[in-house]
Amino acid sequence: MNKKILLWSITAALAGFLFGFDVVVISGADKKLQAIWESTDAFHGMVVMGAALWGTVIGAIFGGVPTNTYGRKNTLIVIGVLFAVSAIGSAFANDPYVFAFARFIGGLGVGASTIAAPAYISEIAPAKDRGRLVAMYQFNIVFGIMIAFLSNYLLSGIGENAWRWMLGVEAIPAVLYILFALKVPKSPRWLLSKGRVSEAREVLKIIDPDIDVDEQIKEFNAHSDKSDKTETIFIKKYRFPLMLAFLIAFFNQLSGINAFLYYAPRIFEEAGLGESTALLSSIGIGVTNLIFTLLGVFLIDKLGRKTLMYIGSIGYIISLGLVSAAFFLGWTGMAVPVFLFLFIAAHAVGQGAVIWVFISEIFPNHLRASGQAFGSSTHWVLAAIIPSSIPFLFNHPMIGPGVVFLVFAGMMVLQLLFVAFMMPETKGKTLEELEDIILKKK
């Protein structure tokens, strides 16, 4: 693999590290912040914990605009700035409203990163390596998650203001990321879409010195010429890729993955573990996530997207069913953590490895950022609603954790049917070839 493409892809994927760190770092401050500000479960879930997720929704809905207008690279740089501002602001906040606003800013960065980073990587990657390279974004998400869990554990004993350090330390990788992002080139497909052919030619020569650059530009222009630049992803022609993006994002969140990551220590305490053991178990979740994401990244271009989704769906059903049973039957000790490790492994090798790769592949070049924004928006609207409701659902006498996890297991049965009967395989094909294949299925 071309070393420069690898370096550029890793740099763009580092937005995923900040995404993962930002989403999970709040879990270490969860119960402390509720106690300090004496918040109700509803206020704590919707405002203190949920503010970042609502920011993510806005970032995902509107992130396609700067990604298309100003380019993937420039958007990635702005994302780094948003993360840095959020980290510093939330660390110095003295009331829940300022804290929520600072977290909201970071959420904007998370949402926009799910559009700009996968789009950028998919547009610089050769077809044979695209799955692995785009999946590095997901790898960095889970690496950020693991580091956040570890950081929370290491900082948890430094005193009353430990939560400020937990949240503020994110500013360090955010600033480093900005410096790295300044050095990557612009996406060649974005440059071509803007008529900047000579700049695109230079980048394409670096991507693959052995290909006929003129032929590749000709292929891009052939597809571009067939496209109506005024059309949107919501017309009948694009109904099938739109449905695919919606359903893969819908099932991703209806597995309960973000609800679990946000409240891992709380869930472990509900299962009978002490506070310290719960935080330590959270690190185990991060390590498991990292290992199985690496496996997914390794396999995605070998086995394909559908096969990984089959494996993940079956793993989800088994693990979530066992977690639900553990709460219903009162199993204590390490039973719930072990079942949730299995759940994380299933997610990492399946949905986790596939979602951002798949959404970045199924839309035509001129609508990729818009399609990515739609899929990301679906993902993040649900990621805001579901985790925000967890404190209320867990504490409701008629619901509780057992029912919640049982519903998640049922949704994964539906995901298995989606994979079997609707999801196309996208491995090994150029983005232009996939455009022809998927639009013929409309």
Image (cartoon, helix red, strand yellow):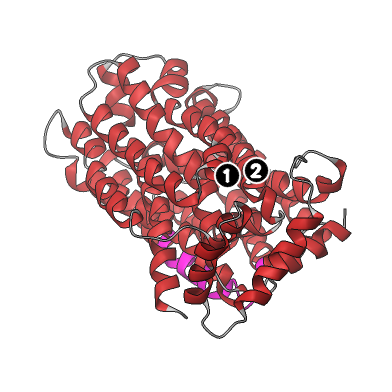
Q: Which residue is mark 1?
A: 68
Residue 93, percent from left and from top: 24, 22
Choose between 305 and 411: the one closer to the eye: 305
Q: Are marks 2 and 1 in contact (CB under 8 Å)?
A: yes
Up the image or down, 346 lies above or below 18; here it is below
Q: Nearer the N terminus, badge 2 or badge 1?
A: 1
Instruction: Say left or right for 326 vs 272.
Output: right
Q: Which residue is mark 2?
A: 370
Q: Amino acid type of disc 2?
A: Ser
Q: Quadrant of residue 261?
A: top left
Q: Amino acid type of disc 1?
A: Asn
Choose between 6 and 171: the one closer to the eye: 6
Q: Main secondary structure of the magenta part?
A: helix
What range of the chain is rendered magenta?
289-306
Up the image or down, 301 lies above or below 412; here it is below
Report the residue at 67% width, 42% height from top: 250
Report the residue at 47% width, 75% height from top: 206
Query: Any magenta on residue 290?
Result: yes
